[in-house]
Amino acid sequence: MLDAAIKAQLAGYLEKLTQPIELVATLDDSAKSRELDELLHDIAAMSDKIGLRRDDGEARKPSFAINRVGTDVGVRFAGIPLGHEFTSLVLALLQVGGHPSKAAAETIAQVQNLEGEFHFETYFSLSCQNCPDVVQALNLMSVLNPNIKHVAIDGALYQDEVERRQIMSVPTVYLNGEVFDQGRMSLEQIVAKLDTSAAARAAETIKTKDAFDVLVVGGGPAGAAAAIYAARKGIRTGVAAERFGGQVLDTMAIENFISVDYTEGPRLGAALEQHVRNYDVDIMNLQRATKLVPASESADGLVEVQLENGASLKAKSVVLSTGARWRQMGVPGENDYRNKGVAYCPHCDGPLFKGKRVAVIGGGNSGVEAAIDLAGIVAHVTLIEFDGKLRADEVLQRKLRSLPNVDVIVSAQSTEVLGDGQKVNGLVYKDRTDGTMHSLTLEGIFVQIGLLPNTEWLKGALELSPRGEIVIDARGQTSLPGVFAAGDATTVPYKQIVIAMGAGSTAALGAFDHLIRTSAPAAETVTA
């Protein structure tokens, strides 16, 4: 099942097991069960600390548990966790086997102190880059706290459950039989949702912090670069981020990051955070900024950033790197059917629409790439573009037009998402050439129409472009003294990871230069 290189790598990891574990297989006569049985035998043969037995009492077949021998510590997978979930499998083996997690000590303590019974089910797809974070977080929680149980379910393999529960987006998490949340979540986010007093405690801690020399708002590539460059100057540096990694976490394949042939968004996001943590940087996750108060309006001459939890942070200089998010169509029905047929990640949610009819909105590179990917999974794809022609690279357009199950409609304005109250069943669009209205019968709509800067909270505080981007100069300086900006939230013309990193570095150096100049002693007056 596993090739020789993967086996050698996995065997090396399994040397870190400190406690015996047991793999418990639940199988039937299907081909997938035979695949899983082969995988489990491969794993069990790699360490004398791993046992294997069969118990077909569980309802989901194929599935398997990883249990710590002699305890009630364990996790369960329903399916074969390869693809993006192979790392989840490796971590589950290690953590159930006693290898310590790298999670923050305070977060581990929070999990261990949770009271109550928590039975989680996570539906994932093997092509979803957002799912492993959720699966790994809940697996770790079930290892740390005996009151927490978790099973990770391959939605493509258990289509009957997906249909019955009307799951149209992954990851979808159930808690005690009810929908808990959908989409990417970090361990900290899940714990904060369960521990309702966590936000208040975090706010009280933040209120006690001294002013920073440089405060970075946002934890994407631009924010990470800014934090590292500032910290290397030996000045007091902080990062307030809603989620470290930002939009990168939602990116699938990255093949244009110079000197790295190939990587994936979640992997790069984790590397960014680890690199920042190598320095003396105060990282404050799960923090959403709501208001910027300029130094000129502050009694102490410091820039103030107010947070959603009621706390505030102050700094001598600030680097804004709040990034961007997927742009929505803004039509009736879109929000009503979000995650009920309206989706924004074809890699994540595509497998849930196998054999169905879908539309892709947007004719740029991302839209055409999405249509090409989906064409290999779904029954039919209709690509809808507002402009009179597609804007994607010609090589992508040629590939798209070669596919037999793809239609392209240009000069079309999407006007309404239709549904039956539970899920999407159609889309209405207007022909911009003659004004006629048309409707399509669909079961999914994938929106790929670009990015929207996360700058609403800055309106009225500093200069924004007509598109809502932060206006900056060559040094990253905004219209406010001491406030710099970088990345996709700014007027930089190209929204690319490598450009954001360079812009973050520039903004940090600009902030440092500002600190030097504003803190320099006044020139002495020479008298005769």
Image: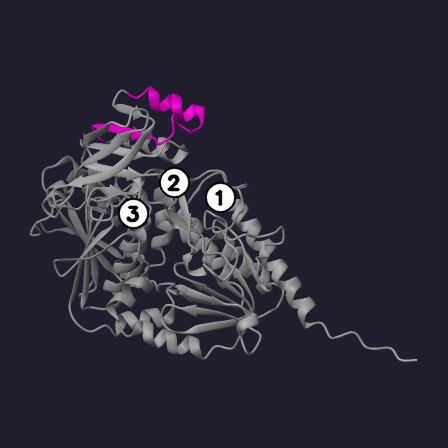
Residue at which label 2 appears? 5
Q: Earlier in the sequence, mark 3 or mark 2?
A: 2
Marks 1/2: CA–CA distance: 36 Å
Q: Residue at point 44% right, 27% down?
A: 393
State the image coordinates of residue 517 (x, y, percent, origin top left).
69, 67
Q: Which residue is mark 1?
A: 495
Q: Nearer the viewer, mark 1 or mark 3?
A: 1
Q: Quadrant of residue 374?
A: top left
| Camera sees residue 66 | no
The magenta span reads: 378-403
> CA separation, marks 1 and 3?
29 Å
- Neighbor class of circle 3 (other Cα within 10 Å; few <14, some 14-19, many 20+) is many
Helix, strand or loop at label 1? It is loop
Q: Is residue 379 magenta?
A: yes
Q: Secondary structure at mark 2?
A: helix
Q: Secondary structure at mark 3?
A: helix
Label 2: few (<14), some or many (≥20) within 10 Å? few
Q: Is residue 490 magenta?
A: no
- The amino acid marked with disc number 2 is Ala
For label 3, the residue is 85
